Image (cartoon, coloured by chain):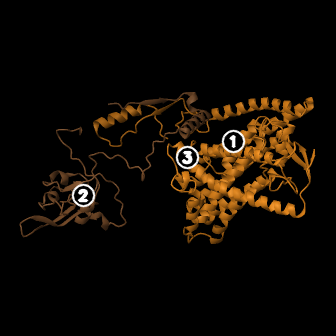
Chain colours: A brown, B orange
Amino acid sequence: MAVGLKTVRRPESGTSYLRATLKGMALTFTHLIRPDKPVLQYPDEKPDLSPRWRGTHRMAVHADGRPKCVACGLCPTVCPSNCIRLVPGEDDQGNRYPIVYEIDEFRCIFCGMCQEVCPVEAIHVGRDFENAEYTRERFIYDLDRLMAQDHAVTDLWDPEDPLGQ
Amino acid sequence: MHEVGALTGWAWFILTMVKILLVFTLTMVIVAMLTLMERKVSAWMQDRIGPNRVGPGGLLQPAADGLKNIMKEETYPSAASSIFFIIAPMLAIGPALITFAVIPFAAPLPTPWGILDMIVADLPIGILYILAITSLGVYGIVMAGWASNNKYSFLGGLRASAQMVSYEVALGLSLIPVFMLAGNVTLTQIVWSQQQELGLWYAFPLGLSFLLFVISAFAETNRLPFDVAEAESELVTGYHTEYSSMKFSMFFIAEYSNMITASALMATLFLGGWDIPFWNGDDMRIIAPGIVEGAAPAVWKTLLTLMAFATKTLFFIFVFMWVRWTVPRFRYDQIMHLGWKVMLPWALAYVTVMAAAILTLDTLGVPFGFMFGLILTGVNLVVTLLFLLVLDRDRIIGGTAPMAPGERGRMPQGITMTRRPRETAGVGADSNISGDIAGQETEWP
C-alpha cells in the first residue's frame, strides 16, 4: 500500500515575511484590545467541577460523630491500587468499626470504586482538587482527616441515567 | 526672539541637580512600570489578564518584584571570575542610564531665575555621545557571558557581541541622512530643524532611515526578534544565566532603560521630539544663554510638550512590546544575513541616494523648507518601497525548507512532505512502502 503524498502549496504571497509579520501584529492587537478575557480568577472564583468529579476522599459520619464505616473490608478488597488500609474492630455490642482507616492519596487512582462498593455509603470520593501539602506523610489521610473533610461528594454514575439528567 | 534671562550661579547649579535627580528617578520608575506594562501587554495579547494581585490592577507588582530581588540570595558560581562577574552588571546598567542625558524631553522652562532647558546635558556632540555610550553597554553583556564560566552564558555573550557589532554599523549609517538634513548632531537642533526649518518630521523625508533605525534599535536593545543573546529556548537565559537577585535585576533595568532611550531617540530623531504637530506655539530653541528663538516659552507649554514627548516615546515602547509578543526569534544566521547583507548595503546606498537628492535640490535652488521635505518624502517613498520589495523577495526567512536541486536561497513553490520509510526490512508490506517512496524525489532536511 502506497503512503499518501501531501504536497503543501505555498503561494508566492504566502511566503512574504513582511506580510506575515503585519498579519501577526494585527492578530495580536485584536487580542490585546479584546475586552472579554476567558480567564477564571482562580483563587477567587472556583471552577465548576462536574458532579461526577472524583477527588480526595471523605468519610460520612453519624449524627453522634462516629464514622458510618462498618469495617466490612469491601473497599480495601475492591481497591485496584491497594491504597486503603483498614484494621476492623468490634465493640461489646457486636458493632464493627474501623480501628485504623487510612487512604494513601498518592497511591489512589481516584477510580471511585470504594464509593461504589460501600454498602453503607460511608466512604466517598469528593469534588475537590486543592490537595497541596508540605510533606509526603500528609498525603496519607487517616480516619479523623477523612471525617473532617467537608467538600461535596461525588455523584455515582447511574447506569439507568447515563447522562445524569 | 525672547529675552528670558540666563540661569547663572547657584540657581543653575541647583536646578541642574534637581533636573538630573528628576530624570534619573523618573527613568527608574518608568523602568519599573515598563516591567509591569510588558507583562500586562503580553498577557492581554495572549488573552490573559496579567498581574492583578499586588495593588490596584497590579500596579504595585514592580515594587514587589524589586523587593523580592533585593531579598533574594546572591549566588556566585565557584568557577566564575568573581571580579568581572560583579563588574559586568554595573557595566551594563551604567551606560544604559546615562544615555538619556542628551535627549531633550520638553520645551525650555521659564523660571524666575532664568530659562531652564529641559535636557540634562545639551552636548554639542549629541547623538555621537549616545552611539558611543550604547556601544559600551555590550561590554557588560560580553563580560557577564565570559565571566560566568558557563557555556550558555558564554554563547549568549558571544552572540550579543556579534549582533551589536553588526547592527551598530547599520544604526550609525542610518543616522547619517539625519545629520545631512539637520546639518548638526545636537538633538535640540534636530528637534528645531523638524519643528521650524523643515517643518516636517524626519520620519517622512527620511523614511527608510527611520525604518533601518527602528530595526537596528531592536537589535541593539536585544529585544525580540533579535534576542538570540538570551534566547530562552536555546541558551536558558543567555548571558545572565548565572546571575540572581539584584545583579539579575540590573541587567533587566539595563534592558528596559535601553528600550526607553531607543524609543526616546526614535521619537526625537524622527517624530519631532517634544514637538506638538500642527502648532507653532511650541517651536522654540535656546540660541544663546537666556535668549529664546521662536515662540515665547511658558510653563504650560513645557508641560504640554513633555506630554507629547512621553506619548511618542510610549508609542515606540509599546511597539517594542507589540513586536516582541508577535514575532518569533530570528535564527542566528538570519540575523547576520539581515545585518550584513541587507541593512549595511542598503544603509550605504541610502546615504548616497539621500546625499545626491539633497545636493540636487540645493543645486536647483529649492529653499530648505516644507517643499524641500516633500520632495525628499517622494524620493523616500520610492526607495522604501524598493527596500521592502527586495527584503521580501529575498526571503530572509527562507532556507528552512528543502530546496529543489539548483535552487539557491529561495523558497520552493511547493514543499513535498513524505513519510520516512520504515527501517524494518524483510516484511513484505514494508518493503513495498519503501519501493513506492524510492520512486519519488525525496529530500530530507
Q: Nearer the viewer, mark 3 or mark 2?
A: 2
Residue B135: tell me if it is visible.
yes
The amino acid type found where label 1 is placed reads Lys
Determine which residue is flagged by label 2.
A58
Task: Judge the density around disc 3: few (<14), some (14-19), many (≥20) Cα neighbours within 10 Å.
Answer: many
Asked if labels 1 and 2 share a chain, the reply is no
Determine which residue is flagged by label 1.
B341
Front-lying residue, B275 or A7: B275
Please give the name of the residue rendered at 71% of the width and 43% of the height, measured from the top-left corner.
Answer: B312
The amino acid type found where label 3 is placed reads Ser
Q: CA distance from mark 1 to mark 3?
A: 32 Å
Q: CA distance from mark 1 to mark 2?
A: 69 Å
Front-lying residue, B422 or A24: A24
The amino acid type found where label 2 is placed reads Arg
Residue B408: tell me if it is visible.
no
> Is residue A87 positioned above or below B186 on the image?
below
Q: Give the x, y percent position of residue B97.
A: 72, 58
Q: Quadrant of the N terminus of chain B?
A: top right
Please give the name of the residue rendered at 87% of the width and 55% of the height, measured from the top-left corner.
Answer: B112
Q: Give the x, y percent position of residue A128.
A: 31, 53
Q: Nearer the viewer, mark 1 or mark 3?
A: 3
Query: With B363 as the anchor, is A90 left or right in this view?
Result: left
Determine which residue is flagged by label 3.
B42
Q: Secondary structure at mark 2?
A: strand
